[in-house]
Image (cartoon, rainbow, N blue to C red):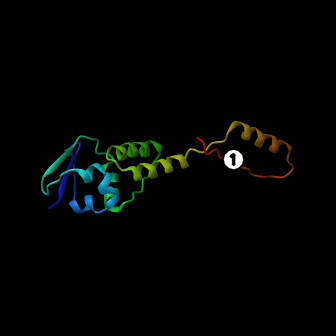
Amino acid sequence: MPVVLNVGGTKFYTSLETLMKNPGLREKSMLAEMNFVEGEEVFIDRDPTHFSYILNYHRDGAVNVNGGGSIRAQIKREAQFYGLENLVQHIEFNLSRGLWRLSRPKFSKILRLIHTSRYPFLEIFIDHNV
């Protein structure tokens, strides 16, 4: 019989095996620590919008988060609530990859080089401390 998770009024079905199969998740995840009884419904007072990502992470140990930074930040918040630190770190890494910017001193250097160069070129500076 499946475990029924009622997340904010939306029902998700899974198995105890799914919630317990990953040793790393068993130790830290809030879902893995709950006392589920097969066939009984458990209510979790959270927005269900991104819960499928949380459940898929329990199933596969990985998740493909498509969408912009706002969606990833929301999923990160849910992962924090459920105690999925590896998923939180994965999302933080992906969020940081999208936040490159030019720093002002280097931007002015690029402008100087463009104005003084006789040859076309492309120079990119990435500030990893954003």
Asked whether residue 110 appears in the rendered view, the answer is yes
Q: Mark 1 highlights which residue?
A: 125
Q: In the rendering, at what x and y percent does residue 78 appear?
A: 35, 44
Q: Residue at x 31, y 47 (%)?
A: 82
Q: Is residue 43 left or right of residue 108?
A: left
Secondary-structure class at tag 1: loop
Q: Quadrant of residue 9?
A: top left
Q: Quadrant of the N terminus?
A: bottom left
Position of residue 69 relative to residue 58, above or below, is above
Number of numbered labels in the structure image: 1
Q: Quadrant of the C terminus?
A: top right
Q: Is residue 123 left or right of residue 15?
A: right
Q: In the rendering, at what x and y percent does residue 122 appear?
A: 74, 51
Q: Is residue 14 left or right of residue 72?
A: left
Position of residue 105 relative to residue 51, above or below, is above
Q: How many other residues sit within 10 Å of disc 1, few (<14), some (14-19) or many (≥20)?
A: few
Q: In the rendering, at what x and y percent does residue 63 appear?
A: 39, 57
Q: Residue furthest front?
A: 27
Q: Residue at x 80, y 52 (%)?
A: 120
Q: Which residue type carries mark 1?
A: Phe
Asked whether residue 15 appears in the rendered view, the answer is no
Q: Residue furthest left?
A: 39
Q: Nearer the viewer, residue 35 or 109?
A: 35
Q: In the rendering, at what x and y percent does residue 99 appear?
A: 56, 44
Q: Residue at x 29, y 56 (%)?
A: 26
Q: Nearer the viewer, residue 20 or 108?
A: 20
